[in-house]
Amino acid sequence: MFDRDDERVDLGSVFDGAAGSTGADRAPPADDWRRLDRALRGIARRRAALDAEEARCLVAAQRLALHRRFGHATLAEYLERTLGYGPRAARERLRVATALQTLPEIADALGRGVHSYSAVRELTRVGRDDTEAAWLAAAAGKTVHEIEAMVAGRRPGDLPGAEVDPTAVRRSLSLEVGTETLALWRDARLALELERGGAVSDDELLATMCREMLGGGRVGAPDHAGGDASPAGRAAYQIALTVCPTCDRTTQDGGGRAIEVPPAVGARARCDATVLGRVDGDDVGRAVQTVPPRIRRAVIARDHGRCRVPGCRSSRFIEVHHIQPRAQGGRHTVANLISLCGGHHDAVHVGRLQIAPAASGEPTFTHADGRPYGAPSPSPTTPRRHERRVSTEPSRSASHHGPLADVEQALRGLGFPASEARAATDACAGHLGQPLAELVRRALRAAHKP
């Protein structure tokens, strides 16, 4: 990515020309652009080398508990107050520094300026000591954006090009809003949580708001002309989804791009959608709803415009679901259809909630493990006093002693949960007597194993 020439370039003539001289005053040297390019590449190389040096220093700072020397509670606080990193950037710097201890080839690529810190940050999310060479080869010549796309949805140990589960791919949105919009966002979250009876994630809230805006939301909400903007007979899915007829691969149109979504999204949409048919030929059929409008209106009316799952209070974002799947012969009948909110409809299609017809006519709702919906999870059997279990595993106590205590403390300071820090520390217990730095490296390798 970077030129090997690391000399400092004298750009005095270039800057002088940019500052005030015109073409009429002085003709710029023919190689000005080459020198400027060399200077920028050199800066990028030196910045990458500094990032690599900083990563090594951060590991040493954690090992020596440098932050305590200045009265700080954590190393992240030290980074924020001393180096100017925000909390999130500080955590990422510590994470990358930790990962580089077990990824020598990626660390070397950063130190030599082959890849920038931003690229290495992404590679440390998926690389392991046995796959880092493959990831470096795949990332050669790619931009940071391309590397981010290559890493998205993959886990440590995966190889480049491995099949990705669309549900594992997460994207970040950075939005700048005014104070009124922020207040509206918080009120919208509260309203949806009251509807569903529990906390909702940013993803769920934003998806619900988008569906409402795109026409699949409130039942019977009046439009500006006093009519019914979203009648009960209208399909909930007015979003462009494309389903491959042979492999069921589903993509959703968004801003001019086809974005792959999990198969459950396509299955959920087929319950309650407007279908255009094939759009890749001259013979374009008439758009039809999967559920006839009159049937949909009857189902919504029967269920009083609310989700039928016991305990759910949602009555605004309602979709219609086939109890017996259409692929198994289920029909568009009132008896085979049920009103669900978006959250519970999704739970059905991913297998967390099961709905089955009953002889009484009322459907039964169960969890994936067969428990009646809402029943408490089975608790592990607690042994009686005279049946105390004896563990043959190594001790997992919350605190180690001697050098192992220092290793566990170093891992905790780098952001590892207590259980993972203890387990990784136990893994290096057989190497006591080695320097503390080597014990920490061994613990880090254990922590990054799947």
Image: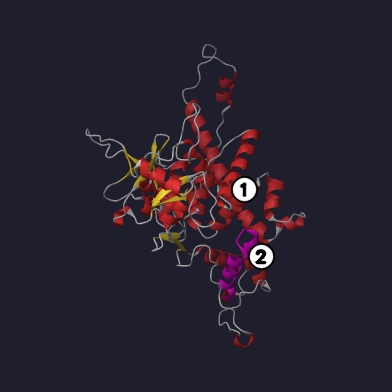
**Disc 1 residue type (three-letter):** Arg
**Disc 2 residue type (three-letter):** Gln
Seen in the picture, residue 450 relative to 267 is either above or below; the reply is below
User: Where on the picture, by quarter, is residue 277?
Assistant: top left
- x 68%, y 73%: residue: 402
- x 62%, y 88%: residue: 386
Badge 1 local density, few (<14 within 10 Å), some, or many (20+)?
Answer: few
Between 21 and 180, which is closer to the camera in this rendering? 180
Residue 153 in view of the camera: no
Horizontal and vertical percent position of residue 19: 60, 20
Horizontal and vertical percent position of residue 81: 72, 47
In this image, 176 relative to 229: left or right? Answer: right
How far, Cα to Cα, is label 2 from label 1?
Answer: 21 Å
Give the mark nearest the N terminus, 2 or 1: 1
Seen in the picture, residue 207 relative to 60 is either above or below; the reply is above
Horizontal and vertical percent position of residue 105: 48, 55
Q: Secondary structure at mark 1?
A: helix
Q: Is residue 412 magenta?
A: yes
- x 53%, y 38%: residue: 42
Q: Secondary structure at mark 2?
A: helix
Q: Nearer the viewer, mark 2 or mark 1?
A: 1
Residue 22 in view of the camera: yes
Q: Which residue is mark 2?
A: 409
Q: Please, what is the dominant secondary structure of the magenta stretch?
A: helix
Q: Quadrant of the N terminus?
A: top left
Q: Which residue is mark 1?
A: 88
Magenta residues, as a range? 411-429
